[in-house]
Image (cartoon, rainbow, N blue to C red):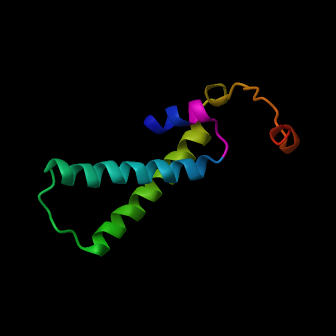
């Protein structure tokens, strides 16, 4: 659900990369946060299990991106046009 809000506010462009990043963020919060808070009593973790959960969360994020972009309504992901000021290298160095 949180990832859909990410796409709603940032747009559907590069959704797969955003999904993988979302999965990695979830991995960091769940694994790192659980260890810091003392929720997880399994310590130390083997490197192979850490890497496998990292890969699983990357696949989770990619799958979430695929599902959200294919099943989501197009109007929900419509990104509003934001006009940014146009700058050029010439205007920056004119002083």
Residue 16, horizontal then vertical, whole percent: 59, 51
Q: Quadrant of the N terminus?
A: top left
Magenta segment boundaries in residue numbering:
7-13
Residue farthest toward the front in the current orientation of the protein: 95
Name the residue nearer the viewer: 88 or 21. Answer: 88
User: Which of the 4 image quadrants contains residue 7?
Assistant: top right
Find residue 88 and report its horizontal and vertical position in percent: 85, 40
Q: Nearer the viewer, residue 56 or 67?
A: 56
Which part of the image, by quadrant, shows the C terminus? top right
Left or right of 75 in this view: 8: left
Residue closer to the observer: 36 or 92: 92
- Tell me if 82 is positioned left or right of 66 in this view: right
Q: Please provide percent x and percent y for residue 71.
A: 58, 37
Query: Residue at 60% across / 41% down in the picture?
Result: 69
Is 33 contained in the magenta span?
Answer: no
The number of numbered badges drawn on the structure is 0
| 25 up-or-down from 94: above or below | below
| Image position of 76 (left or right of 90) | left
The answer to whether 10 appears left or right of 89 in the picture is left
């Amino acid at each position: 659900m949180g990832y859909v809000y990410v796409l709603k506010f940032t747009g559907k462009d590069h959704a797969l990369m955003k999904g993988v990043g979302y999965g990695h963020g979830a991995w960091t919060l769940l694994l790192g946060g659980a260890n810091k808070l003392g929720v997880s009593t399994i310590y130390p973790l083997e490197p192979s299990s850490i890497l496998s959960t990292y890969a699983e969360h990357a696949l989770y994020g990619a799958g979430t991106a695929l599902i959200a972009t294919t099943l989501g309504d197009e109007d929900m992901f419509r990104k509003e046009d934001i006009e940014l000021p146009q700058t050029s290298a010439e205007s920056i160095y004119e002083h």
